Amino acid sequence: MFWFFLLSVISVVFFLLAKKKLNAQKLSEKDPFDIRKFESKENFEEANGIALKIKTLKQLADLDEKIMKIEEQSANALSEKRQQSLDEKVETLKLAYDLAYSYLSCWQFIVDLELDTTLDELNLLGKRISNEEKLTLIENGTVRSEAWYVVSPDDEFEVLDDDDKESLKFLTKLRKVVESEDSATDKDKKINTLVDKNKGIAANWFDIEHAHPASEQLWEVLENQ
């Protein structure tokens, strides 16, 4: 009976460890900024110290050039000991490059500018967002999870043009009214006034000449989302 109990306990422990490892692996796959896959390497501390000093793309490019020079030195090394020393240095610098590349990357939140785009989402548009900020927002469930895009150092960051900035400004004011604690009557008044004062930009979402007030059009759109 004792041995059966002991085997059961051991089985449970192995199951929990395997589950923990699997969960960590899934998290790493979901989070491209997760550096835990590097932490087990012997040269991690040294490489991470180098990576943390790299703040610009030029410094990252300089590190890449340095790696190539040392690789060339290794290929022409006069002794096996010298070659081994250079190869170890290359491995450390390559790890530092991977870490720095990750540290210089960021997230961008990209959605269409529509009436149902929430205020939290509008506030993220056109901004570089750190991994920590993104994980917090996802955990809180305040923004849609499918609109996140990794921006690596060699990727192009999508900036808002002048028209998008005007649309963003208008929709931000509109969503502040929609998400406020004002009464329905006060909201309707503010929405109609805002649309009336910004007919040019508001025409992208509202039928300005329609008989129904802009507030009615807005609530109808939001109810059908």
Image (spheres, rainbow, N blue to C red):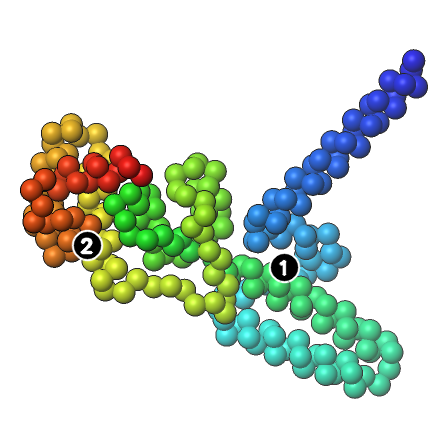
Left or right: residue 8 compared with residue 141: right
Residue 180: % across, % down: 22, 34
- Res. 191 in view: no
> From the viewer's perspective, is residue 77 above or below residue 41?
below
Front-most of residues 81 and 110: 110
Q: Which mark is residue 48?
A: 1
Residue 21: % across, % down: 71, 40
Image quarter where the N terminus lies is top right
* Residue at image coords 62%, 63%: 98
Residue 192: % across, % down: 10, 41
> From the viewer's perspective, is residue 94 above or below residue 147?
below
Residue type at the position of mark 2: Asn
Q: Mark 2 points at which residue?
A: 204
Could you say which quadrant of the image residue 162 lies in?
bottom left
Residue type at the position of mark 1: Asn
Could you say which quadrant of the image residue 22 lies in?
top right
Marks 2,1: beta carbons within 8 A? no
- Mark 1 Cα shell of 10 Å, populated few (<14), some (14-19), many (≥20): many
Image quarter where the C terminus lies is top left
